[in-house]
Image: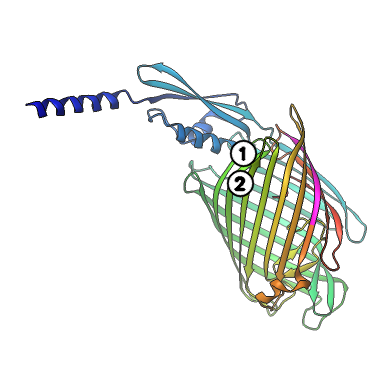
Amino acid sequence: MKKNILLFAFLLIAFYGIAQEKIVYDVKFQGQKKNKVGFLKNYISVRNGDALDSLQLENDVILLKRLAGVSHAYYQVFYSHDNLYNVYFNIEENFTLIPNVNLWTTTNEQVAYKVGLYDYNFLGRNIAFGGFYQNNGFDSYGINLRAPNLFTRNFGVAINHQNWTSEEPLFFDGGSANYKYSNTSFEVLALYQINFRHRLQFGINIFKEEYDYLSGITSDAIPQSLSLDKQMLKFVYEYDALNYDYQYVEGYKNTLYLQYVTTANDFQNNFLIGWSDFLYFERVGERGNWANRFRFGVASNNSSPFAPFSVDNNLNIRGVGNIIDRGTASMVLNSEYRYTLYEKGWFILQGNGFLDAGTWRNPGGDFGDFVDSKNFRIYPGVGLRFIHKRIFNAIFRIDYGHGVTKNAGRGIVFGIGQYF
């Protein structure tokens, strides 16, 4: 009898505890203007009727801060009635209609320019849409649409078209030659978010490359005019454990890129290329941020001037110059310390000291090329960032890198957004 009474009391307490579990009565948003409430409700994971879970709400805040249209977000919980609670997500929005204007000089001292316009929160639904026109002695343009949540919360699409023309060097044993390089491409990618941290992209890119000789040495092995039709199968896997607080970032992220390119010509075989970007960020005090990127990439090791990895100012090593070498494998470390020098209202001035270092495998070479001193590039440097807190990716950067390895150069690199 006593056991039955104890069992009944235990069940009664358990039932009462379940009955008193805190439940989400309604999810509301405050502060949004352009962002559509319907989209935001579908994007986050918490739903009316869910058990109130602070960890779930914190993860939803991280998701919201990853949106281009959100500069900052936080949540509040208010009692409604009985065991029911209202959840409020407070949104600080980014301005996302961004013009792009760049001016620079080319290697032959021509003035080049690039103009574009992108809306990174088109229709208030986290859709990036826009295009650009560039003239660097040649005409180029691109049109891009990226809608990661177009069909469902987890499934979307990206469609890109680009017609790109530039002057690029090809490297031979005896030196290099400059070619007019054209690439006309059409790309369709499926975008799938597995869960809070894991994302996939996969699809196809159909493109045509054309090379026309301009100047430099010539080679019997490479024609002065070449047209190549190619197809690329693309796969991207992303693990994202980053958390953003305005200009500060914490955590780590890894992105794996795999591509298989097919072509039918006598100068380049079908080839595989893959690389991984590992990012690690750590807050240092109230104003400091230590940022790191380690990139390792490998491609089919063809002895060809068309090697896919390039040593370039804007890609991997600041100050080294524009496409000074190519390789079939690369290993690059970028490390920098960012410090907020001044912050008031929407404006932030950030300084940084950096070290960029990398090495390459020569086309047709072996991994011993990684430790060949002729392939090492080490460039320390300093830079400034001018940041607008309420405009998406409104970071104007300027960096000065000075090489310390043999025959190294130095130079200034401008750009929009953090270097990585």
Question: What whole-number distance in Å separates the C-alpha atoms at marks 2 and 1?
Answer: 22 Å
Quadrant in the rendering for residue 326: bottom right
Q: Which mark is residue 46?
A: none
Q: Residue furthest bottom?
A: 220
Amino acid on which the number 2 mark rests in the picture: Arg
Q: Residue furthest right?
A: 109
Provide the residue designation for mark 2: 146
Is 276 situated above or below 364? above
Extent of the magenta region = 380-388
Type of colouring = rainbow
Q: Main secondary structure of the magenta part?
A: strand
Q: Residue 178: horizontal and vertical position, in percent?
A: 84, 69
Amino acid on which the number 1 mark rests in the picture: Tyr
The reply to whether residue 418 is in sight is: no
Q: Residue 347: horizontal and vertical position, in percent?
A: 76, 31
Q: Residue 199: horizontal and vertical position, in percent?
A: 52, 50
For label 2, count other residues whose C-alpha is less than 10 Å away and answer few (under 14), some (14-19) or many (20+): many
